[in-house]
Image: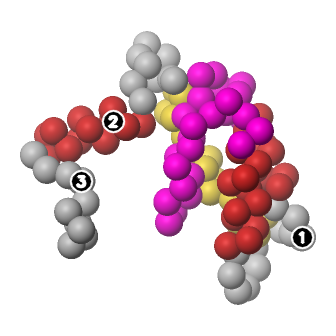
Amino acid sequence: MTVVALLSVAPVTEGSMAADVADAVAALDDFDVDYETNPMGTVIEADSVAELFDACEAAHRAVESDRVSTVLKIDDKRASDASAAAKVEAVEAALGRPARGDADQ
C-alpha cells in the first residue's frame, strides 16, 4: 500500500462522540483499505489516493450531525510502497526501543 493518511471525523457537539466516531470508522469497512484507530484519529492505508478519498468521504458522511469536523493528512509516497508499520519500525530502529512511553513496554 502506498498512501497513508490520518483521518479524524467528529461531530461538533458536547458530550461523548464515541458512537458517531464508531459510525465513521465502520464506514471504512466498505473499502479496500487497512486502518487502525487511535485516540487522535484513524490511520488509513490504501493502494490509491482515489480509494483513500472515497473511504474518507464515506466516513465523513457516516456521521449524522448538524455539523461535522473532518481533518485529513495524507502521505502519498509515490516512489515507495512503505507501509505505516514500516514507518513506525524505522523510527523504533533509530530510537533503539519501542516508540511507546507507557508502563506496558
- In the rendered image, residue 39 lying in the magenta stretch gets the answer yes
Label 3 CA crowd tier, 10 Å (few <14, some 14–19, many 20+): some
Picture coordinates of residue 11, whole percent (x, y) = 76, 69
Secondary structure, mark 1, is: loop
Residue underneath mark 1: 66
Q: Residue at x 59, y 29 (%)?
A: 46
Q: Nearer the viewer, residue 46 or 29?
A: 29
Q: Which mark is first along the chain, 3 or 2? A: 2
Q: Which mark is residue 87?
A: 2
Compared across the picture, whether 88 is left or right of 52 comes to left
What separation in Å lies between label 2 and label 3 (alpha carbons)?
Answer: 11 Å
Label 1 CA crowd tier, 10 Å (few <14, some 14–19, many 20+): few
Report the amino acid beneath label 2.
Answer: Lys
Residue underneath mark 3: 99
Q: Which mark is residue 42?
A: none
- Can I make out residue 73 in this image? no
Report the amino acid beneath label 3.
Answer: Ala
Q: Which mark is first along the chain, 1 or 2? A: 1
In this picture, which residue range is highlighted in magenta?
A: 29-53
